[in-house]
Amino acid sequence: MAKDHATWATKALFFEGRSWPAARVVGRRELYGQPSSGAASDLEPISIAFVETSGLGRSWKATEALGFWRSFGEIDPKNDAAIADFVRRHGDPESLLSPTVAVHTGEWKQPLSLCKTIAEAWIKPDANGISHCKRNLPLMVHGLVDRHVEKNVLAHTQPIFDPEFGIRLKPDKLAGFMVLSAVTMLFEKTPLRRCTHCGDWMSFSRSTAKTCSVACRNAVSRQSKRTGTDR
Ligand SMILES: [Zn+2]
């Protein structure tokens, strides 16, 4: 069912991803980047995590913008459990991870800070758990979108033809899919809530919808059958 507030942009996104249920953080390293000025504070190292996986992973497909970009923006880059949990459920933002290719979180910095900043346009959830996008978008958000999206995301997004829909936009990395989901939802002021099963932020077509995916809906119904509660 189409979301009544959705326009072409959120519905036109397309992404084929792979989550890695066996992903784990196997170590960390302090990384010094190129200092952006002569200030001593610009030589602070950042701690990056190394992520490995085994197994085949699980492929998934999105045919519209998804709200978990906001959950990505909430990850503390020092929290190994949160990093592993994200990769297990959604995949590696750079879309490079495989059993033969380990990855690091050094490249997470930019999409993570962009998602975190865009999320500031949404206010705290109301009594029904629904978080609304503010009417006036903070100037800061506009600045970030202008600076980064064109160069880092749109340049790596292909238009594709979908006979069932028409033209769709297909980013080449999970990070690009999350940033485009965030930006299109920002411009549409999409209300978001948390999935009652996995806790991810999600958009919804009915205000009674409580889960982000078929998998989460099935998990909740299995749970309620076991406990006899109706959720
Ligand atoms: Zn969920």
Image (tube, rainbow, N blue to C red):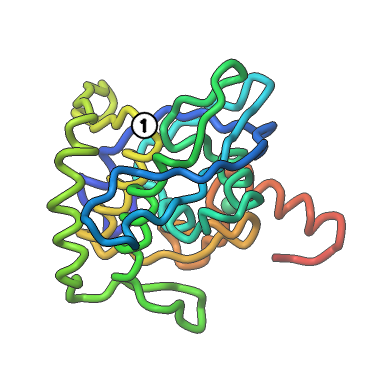
How many marks do you count on the picture? 1
Q: Secondary structure at mark 1?
A: loop
Q: Residue furthest bottom?
A: 127
Q: Nearer the viewer, residue 153 or 28?
A: 28
Identify the residue at image location x=35%, y=56%.
Answer: 113
Assign the C terminus to one quadrant of the image: bottom right
Q: Is residue 106 above or below residue 200?
A: above
Which percent across, then down, holds residue 17?
A: 46, 30
Indicate the amino acid at tag 1: Lys
Q: Residue at x 58, y 47 (%)?
A: 83
Label 1 near ligand 1 (CB < 8 Å): no
Which residue in the structure is indicated by mark 1?
173
Say above or below: 27 vs 119.
above
Give coordinates of residue 149: x percent, y percent: 20, 45
Question: x, y percentage for residue 31?
Answer: 45, 43
Q: Residue at x 26, y 61 (%)?
A: 39
Task: Answer left or right for 125 relative to 123.
Answer: right
Residue 38 versus residue 49 in the image, above or below: below
Residue 228 appears left or right of 111 = right
Name the one closer to the observer, 61 or 38.
38
Residue 194: x and y, percent? 53, 63
Decide if residue 13 is in sight here: yes
Density class for disc 1 (Cα within 10 Å; few <14, some 14-19, many ≥20) is: some
Query: Is residue 68 shown to the viewer in this render?
Result: no
The quadrant holding residue 118 is bottom left
Near-viewer residue (186 or 35): 35
Q: Residue furthest top?
A: 100
In percent of the image, x 53 and y 39: which residue is there? 90
